Image (spheres, rainbow, N blue to C red):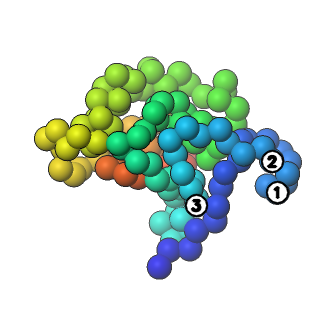
């Protein structure tokens, strides 16, 4: 069984208990999986709204930087193609499994049917 540490804060220097909760729209339960060495978050493909925005917010949280400090996400992956993938998960339109991985700044994001994984990478 993996050991998880809950992460639900915006990046800042204050202690975790005094940070403002991240304003995720679709992601739930962003946690650090100590065994795997990466962060995981759940989402429901059928009700995922603005998931692409949530991915950017989560990468910001994982890296501990403000979203303005990240490279533009649309330069890494097409938001419309991302939404199409998530929609196909919700409707089972030809997507039975698999995943999509892409790098955003110093983080590799992997999208699966109902989970996102965020792995910090050295620069």
Image quarter (top left, top right, bottom left or bottom right) of the C terminus: top right
* Rendered image quadrant of residue 111: top left
Mark 1 Cα-neighbour bin, 10 Å: few <14, some 14–19, many ≥20? few
In the image, residue 93 sits, relative to residue 17, either above or below, namely above
Q: Which residue is mark 3?
A: 32
Do residues under tags 2 and 1 come within 8 Å of each other at their CB atoms? yes
* Distance from Cα at disc 2 to Cα at disc 3: 17 Å
Q: Which residue is mark 2?
A: 19
* Distance from Cα at disc 1 to Cα at disc 3: 16 Å
Residue 4: mark in rendering? none
* Rendered image quadrant of residue 31: bottom right
**Residue at x-position 44% and y-position 48%:** 43
| Secondary structure state at the residue bearing disc 2 | loop
Can see residue 44? yes
Determine whether, in the image, residue 115 is placed left or right of residue 86: right
Can see residue 106? no
| Secondary structure state at the residue bearing disc 3 | strand
Q: Where is residue 64 drawn, in percent x and y? A: 69, 43
* Distance from Cα at disc 2 to Cα at disc 1: 6 Å
Mark closest to the chain's N terminus, 1 or 3? 1
Using the image as rendered, state which of residue 11 and residue 29 is in the foreground.
29
**Residue at x-position 18% and y-position 50%:** 96
Mark 1, mark 3: which one is toward the viewer? 1
Using the image as rendered, state which of residue 42 and residue 38 is in the foreground.
42
Determine whether, in the image, residue 97 is placed left or right of residue 45: left
Residue 17: mark in rendering? 1
**Residue at x-position 49% and y-position 49%:** 118
In the image, residue 60 sits, relative to residue 38, either above or below, namely above
Give the farthest residue toward the bottom: 1
């Amino acid at each position: 069984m993996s050991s998880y540490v809950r992460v639900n804060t915006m990046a800042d220097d204050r202690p975790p208990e005094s940070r403002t909760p991240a304003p995720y729209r679709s992601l739930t339960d962003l946690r650090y999986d100590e065994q795997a060495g990466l962060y995981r978050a759940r989402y429901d493909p059928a009700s995922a709204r603005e998931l692409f925005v949530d991915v950017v917010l989560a990468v910001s949280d994982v890296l501990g930087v403000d979203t303005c400090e990240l490279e533009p996400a649309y330069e890494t992956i097409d938001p419309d193609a991302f939404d199409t993938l998530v929609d196909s998960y919700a409707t089972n339109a030809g997507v039975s499994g698999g995943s999509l991985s892409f790098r955003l700044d110093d983080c590799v994001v992997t999208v699966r049917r109902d989970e996102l994984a965020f792995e910090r990478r050295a620069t």
